[in-house]
Amino acid sequence: MTGHVLGEPGAGAHMDDKAAIRINVGGFKKRLQSDTLSRFPETRLARLLHCQSKESILELCDDYDDTEKEFYFDRNPALFPYVLNFYNTGRLHVMAELCIFSFSQEIEYWGINEFFIDSCCSSAYHCRKMDQDREDWEDRSDEGSTTSSFDELLEFYNDASKFDKQLLGSARRRIWLMLDNPGYSVASRIISILSILVVLGSIATMCMNSMSEFSLLDSEGQPTEDPRFETVEHFGIGWFTLELVARFVVAPDLLHFFEHPLNVIDLVSILPFYLTLLINLVVESSPALANLGRVAQVLRLMRIFRILKLARHSTGLRSLGATLRNSYKEVGLLLLYLAVGVSFFSVMAYTVEKEDSEDLSTIPACWWWATVSMTTVGYGDVVPVSIAGKLTASACILAGILVVVLPITLIFNKVLPLLQETKTAGDRNEKL
């Protein structure tokens, strides 16, 4: 079909404005005037007028017959009349029965911008396209959920297969499954329940130890540890240590053991206890280092991180962690909005209140007030007293409502599918 001679080089560039070119779109044939196409030089058909070689023509169309001077396009002939109408009128119109996705792809192929859609069709077109994008997004979320679940299952089986070439691989695999998969057997469920009870008991004793009703005094009148709470604490540390060591010994890959977040949480939950013992020994042997005792007190408070150990036994907590990890951009956007608002209104409050209110006499003090106001908490511990300060506070509160509301749709649309996706994957793994 295709000939051998396109014409003299440069002929396309000097084509007569009144000349006509022949277009064949999926069997729909039409002769178009060059001056009509030249009105829109960025479109695909107008760019054909300036092609100077056969190769450049074939970059814009699917085939070219140089004997008939006819350009072939393998496109939908039913949609091409809309393109012709655009060249004649300069505007695009969209019929209600058209598929928005196909129409959008078609005008993009011909190099026609959506800006040319006439006002009578623009609103309906963009509304339908947003609905289509939302449906596509939901489909991709479902697909992502399947892919994520498959990846987790594949990783699970890859880890399980590593035991085949290791010493006592079969026994280690059973112990590994019993410790890491609560749904593996009755024994694994018992271990999981016992671990949860130890975590809750450890947190409860830490809270009770801070209450005056349960505090004991030594011979010098100083508060001391209740022996009963100390016994519970030592039992919990022994259980957590045994659990971590057992998991480490039977792990399929020792080199990458602590790359898993749950294993890091297990280590952090027992590390403060052993560091506290070490610091106490150093302080007893060197009284000059008595200030290290304060460090030990801070480390004791770090026991609260043991509550994160429940993530190993809770699909919901793991889902929350995976969701925050995958939606950090949306959460960061919300925090950025809040940071900008707090910085702005804290300076405003300082400017108008520094002479009237001692509570708002410094910018850092105003940060606290602006943060409480923008998050709509409203403790009321710090309030402006001047009229300008109250107007600033009103603007801060209204801006805080908008700051929280504006990105919430983005976060919800990202968080909800991820939460469902991760929970589904976790439930499937527990059933293995």
Image (cartoon, rainbow, N blue to C red):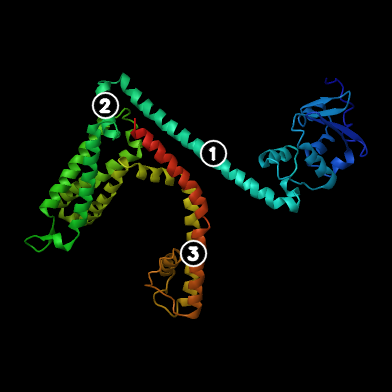
Q: Mark 3 is on which residue type?
A: Gly
N-terminal-most mark, 1 or 2: 1
* Rendering coords of residue 99 (x, y %): 68, 40
**Closer-to-camera residue (209/406):** 406
**Closer-to-camera residue (139/51):** 139
Callout 2 secondary element: helix
Q: Mark 1 is on which residue type?
A: Asp
Q: CA–CA distance between discs 1 and 2? A: 38 Å
The residue at the point 10 percent across, 64 percent down is: 221
* Rendering coords of residue 333 (x, y %): 50, 53
Check the image and report above or below for 77 versus 374: above
Residue carrying label 2: 174
Residue carrying label 3: 400
> From the viewer's perspective, is 75 left or right of 214?
right
Task: Give the label, 1 or 2, closer to the camera.
Answer: 1
The residue at the point 90 percent across, 27 percent down is: 8
What number is the disc on residue 139? 1
Q: Mark 2 is on which residue type?
A: Arg
Name which quarter of the figure residue 382 lies in: bottom left
For label 3, the crowd category at 10 Å Cα-Cα, with few meaning under 14, some 14 to 19 and many 20 or more, is: many
Callout 3 secondary element: helix
Q: CA–CA distance between discs 3 and 2? A: 53 Å
* Rendering coords of residue 60 (x, y %): 77, 32
